[in-house]
Image (cartoon, helix red, strand yellow):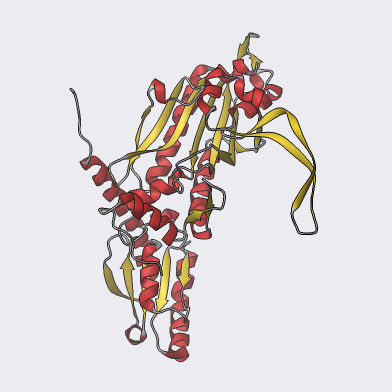
Amino acid sequence: MAEKLTTRATDYSKWYNELVINADLAEHSAVRGCMVIKPYGFAIWEKMRDALDKMFKDTGHQNAYFPLFVPRSFLEKEEGHAEGFAKECAVVTHYRLKVNPDEKGKLMVDSESKLEEELIVRPTSEAIIWNTYKGWIQSYRDLPILINQWANVVRWEMRTRLFLRTAEFLWQEGHTAHSTAQEAIAETKQMLEVYADFAERFMAMPVIKGSKSESERFAGALDTMCIEALMQDGKALQAGTSHFLGQNFAKAFDVKFTSKEGVLDYVWATSWGVSTRLMGALIMTHSDDQGLRLPPMLAPIHVVIVPIYKGEEQLAMISEKIQPLMSELRAKGITVKYDNDDTKRSGWKFAEYELKGVPVRVAIGPKDMENGTIEIARRDNGTKQTIPMAGAAELIQHLLDEIQKNLFDQALAHRDSHITEVNTY
């Protein structure tokens, strides 16, 4: 197991970085500014992605995919958009043909050519998508278009921090087209509500909804709405944004439609997105000096069962005894890990699953076998109790609901206790 974490009070930033590494969520890659998301971290992101994906589809959106490369001329068509991303773009200027290894394995390039037009590695997809929409939209009958894309984007960063700010990150970006401003504004507000609902219901993270100031708006938007959450260090984190783009991109790419009345007009647009920054938000909202505290709705493992035994015979008896409980839990949709790894002591396992934020830990030893009991430990508050094995599945299911609510209540109390109303300078 990794060394003890630096405490939040000692150095919050160092605590965060150590926790991401030690809990096996992610690590720095060989490519400067980029990260490797490890299986445990990606399992949490998949839970986020799957929940959000369902919420998008429940509100009528469909998934599609657009190119990673954006011609430079496309990005420059919307002046504010181009200016906003100018300093963050990774640009492809050349291509190489016939790259072959020589006898020592070194790559030899036969020829190199400059591209006729430079390509931008996707920092966001408004430009390439609105160029595409031009071929999809002719009349009001083609609207609305409600598209979401799950993708990676690149925004060149010099000072990076795992999950919170990296040169490449994963996200989703919604891009919708509408026949009226009212419909587009309603879409912008609806998606902000979807993000807020996800943050509070799944992440157990209370948020404040509002509009950004003019100087903080998304490049090319008329209005940017966002959800903000308060982290444990007293700093706010922007956790999701929804943009009303007006007709800016439709005018830039000449996307017009014929209305019911036969009038030709420009299409109204929105875009909205959340990213793997939500992973950072999850960590900084709930975790403590011992490690992660994961809300059950996003935990890859809900319950870990650790047998305490001496010898293979005792282990076999415990394994047989605990099997019905594991089956009951799984039938309820609760993910269970039975850790019978005989190369690690139970104390090591307890500390490891505490670090990884598993919501409920179950321990069972020879005395529990005799008494028909198990010991349950909660990750959110550290309490332990011994309960009968009969009926334990129902109790654990109730505990998981309670832990989810408790984490939200704790985060809400922290946020509300740090709000000060200021009416004068």
Point out residue 145 in the picture as x, y percentages from the top left corner: 61, 28
- Residue at 57%, 28% in the rendered image: 176
- Residue at 69%, 18% in the rendered image: 138
Rendered view: 320 above or below 256:
below
Point out residue 128 in the picture as x, y percentages from the top left corner: 64, 28
Point out residue 70 in the picture as x, y percentages from the top left corner: 65, 31
Q: In which quarter of the image is the C terminus?
A: top left
Q: Can residue 358 be seen in this view?
A: no
Residue placed farthest to the left in the image? Answer: 424
Q: Can residue 343 be seen in this view?
A: yes
Q: Quadrant of the N terminus?
A: bottom left
Residue 372, quarter of the rendered image:
bottom left
Work out whether residue 369 or residue 170 is closer to the camera in this orientation and state it: 170
Q: Is residue 16 left or right of residue 52?
A: left
Rendered view: 199 above or below 393:
above
- Residue at 34%, 40% in the rendered image: 229
Residue 350, quarter of the rendered image:
bottom left
Rendered view: 275 above or below 245:
below
Point out residue 140 in the picture as x, y percentages from the top left corner: 64, 18
